[in-house]
Image: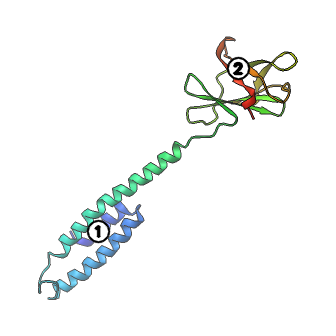
């Protein structure tokens, strides 16, 4: 088998890594020029030296193999980092027992609760509604937060700024029982 046949296979195998392809092309041209010089009677150590280009080329290719692995590993790590990017939770962040999060915000005069997964990306809520109760400067108040979309619950306009009170949130499941209970300081909610 000729060197050009194996070189072609090598280039097809590693063409996904542009740096390796460029280095291989340069090495192939060097080996071809050196081989021609050796066959013509010239060369580094006198005439007729045919074996020098192939071992030199193989040694350089052996050095390039880890470069390809490193390039592919870097691509895989970059893909994982992109995949594992953490989202941002709006408002007050509350960690849940199942590993997810709740984001609590005050949208004007409405209370908004959003459900997030472990990577802080919005996720479909596992509760059917959220009950909230608090005591403001005047009296005890309560509201039922109903689904606005798959991951967000919103109350009717019942909050009165400034939000200097503690609210108690109760997540109600499909079986109409309390799943989780949280107390939050609405002063820290934006």
- Residue extending furthest right? 138
Residue at 83%, 34% (x, y): give it. 108
Callout 2 secondary element: loop
Callout 1 secondary element: helix
Location of the C terminus (image quadrant): top right
In this rendering, the answer to whether 43 lies above or below 114 is below
* Left-right relation of 170 to 31: right
* Disc 2 target residue: 128
Residue at 74%, 21% (x, y): give it. 166
Residue 41 on image: x %, y %: 14, 88
**Near-viewer residue (78 or 186):** 186
* Disc 1 target residue: 7
**Near-viewer residue (164 or 77):** 164
In this rendering, the answer to whether 74 lies above or below 166 is below
Residue at 80%, 28% (x, y): give it. 163
Residue 133 on image: x %, y %: 77, 17
Scheme of image coloration: rainbow
* Left-right relation of 1 to 100: left
Residue 85 on image: x %, y %: 55, 43
User: Which quarter of the figure has residue 122?
Assistant: top right
User: Label 1 neighbourhood size at 10 Å, few (<14), some (14-19), many (20+)?
Assistant: some
Image disc number at residue 131: none
How far is mark 2 from mark 1, CA to CA?
63 Å
Residue at 30%, 78% (x, y): give it. 29
Q: Comparing marks 2 and 1, which lies closer to the viewer?
A: 2
Location of the N terminus (image quadrant): bottom left
Residue 132 on image: x %, y %: 76, 19
User: Label 2 neighbourhood size at 10 Å, few (<14), some (14-19), many (20+)?
Assistant: some
User: Which quarter of the figure has residue 60?
Assistant: bottom left
**Near-viewer residue (73 or 6):** 73
In this rendering, the answer to whether 72 lies above or below 57 is above
* Left-right relation of 40 to 26: left
């Amino acid at each position: 088998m000729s060197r050009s046949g194996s070189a072609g296979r090598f280039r097809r195998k590693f063409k996904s890594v542009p740096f390796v392809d460029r280095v291989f092309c340069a090495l192939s041209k060097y080996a071809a020029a050196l081989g021609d010089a050796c066959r013509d009677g010239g060369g580094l150590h006198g005439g007729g030296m045919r074996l020098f280009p192939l071992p030199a080329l193989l040694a350089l290719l052996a050095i390039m193999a880890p470069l390809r692995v490193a390039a592919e590993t870097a691509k895989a790590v970059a893909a994982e980092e992109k995949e594992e990017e953490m989202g941002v939770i709006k408002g007050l962040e509350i960690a849940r027992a199942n590993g997810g999060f709740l984001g609590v915000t005050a949208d004007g005069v409405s209370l908004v609760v959003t459900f997030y997964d472990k990577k802080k990306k919005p996720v479909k809520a596992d509760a059917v509604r959220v009950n909230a109760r608090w005591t403001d400067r005047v009296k005890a108040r309560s509201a039922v937060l109903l689904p606005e979309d798959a991951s967000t619950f919103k109350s009717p306009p019942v909050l009165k700024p400034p939000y200097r009170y503690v609210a108690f949130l109760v997540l109600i499941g499909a079986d109409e029982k309390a799943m989780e209970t949280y107390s939050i300081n609405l002063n820290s909610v934006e």
